[in-house]
Image: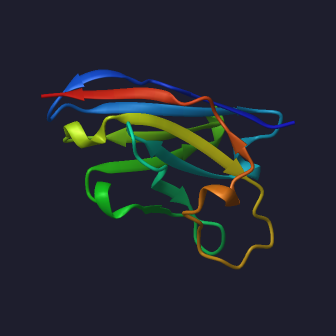
Amino acid sequence: HVQVVESGGGWVQVGDSLSLSCTASGRPLSDLVVAWFRQGPGKDREFVAALSWSGPEEFYYGDSIQGRFTSSRDNAKNAVYLQMTSLKPEDTAVYYCAAAFAEGSRIPYSDLPYEYDYWGQGTQVTVSS
């Protein structure tokens, strides 16, 4: 059984940087594809970043965070990171790590929450002006 856990959330000020971590148990993260989503107050769950499902390993990003957020994977530490910079109040949300098995997939990546089977509890990020 796969479990994912996020950590690293907190309260920051506008323009600050913050890094989130996602770790997995039950299977190595190298066996999974991982994505980040977020859900702000009163908003739908929003796609943030996703590891490619096929082709070269790379991360894809949502439009609202392009150029400010970077995700990476460290298989040796069994962790995926989301480095967030130039944070804005609208980045305030609960951030979720999600994972799925994508072996044999032909799609480049997925930004759809229902495509991911394993979810963490979420970590709160609050950006104060």
Most foreground residue, 115 or 15: 115
Q: Nearer the viewer, residue 112 or 7?
A: 112
Describe the colour scheme in one phrase.
Answer: rainbow
Q: Residue furthest front?
A: 42
Residue at 30% over, 27% down: 126
- Please, is residue 47 above or below residue 16 in the view? below
Query: Where on the picture, by quarter, is residue 97?
Result: top right
Question: Which residue is painted at 21% across and 37% down in the image?
Answer: 89
Q: Residue furthest bottom?
A: 106
Number of numbered callouts drawn:
0
Q: Residue at x 12, y 28 (%)?
A: 129
Q: Nearer the viewer, residue 68 or 98?
A: 98
Q: Is residue 80 above or below residue 122?
A: below
Query: Residue placed at 71% from the left, 79% from the top?
Result: 106
Quick one: quadrant of the N terminus? top right
Dividing the picture into quadrants, the one containing residue 118 is: top right
* Residue 122, quarter of picture: top right
Question: Residue 64: percent from the left, percent from the top?
Answer: 30, 58
In screen coordinates, is 35 left or right of 42?
A: right
Q: Position of residue 91 (x, y in %)?
A: 29, 41
Q: Does residue 27 appear to the left or right of 61 in the view shown?
A: right
Q: Name the outermost residue toward the top.
A: 11
Position in image of residue 53 (x %, y %): 65, 67
Q: Is residue 28 left or right of residue 123?
A: right
Residue 90 on image: x %, y %:
25, 42
Rendered position, 34 above or below 42: below
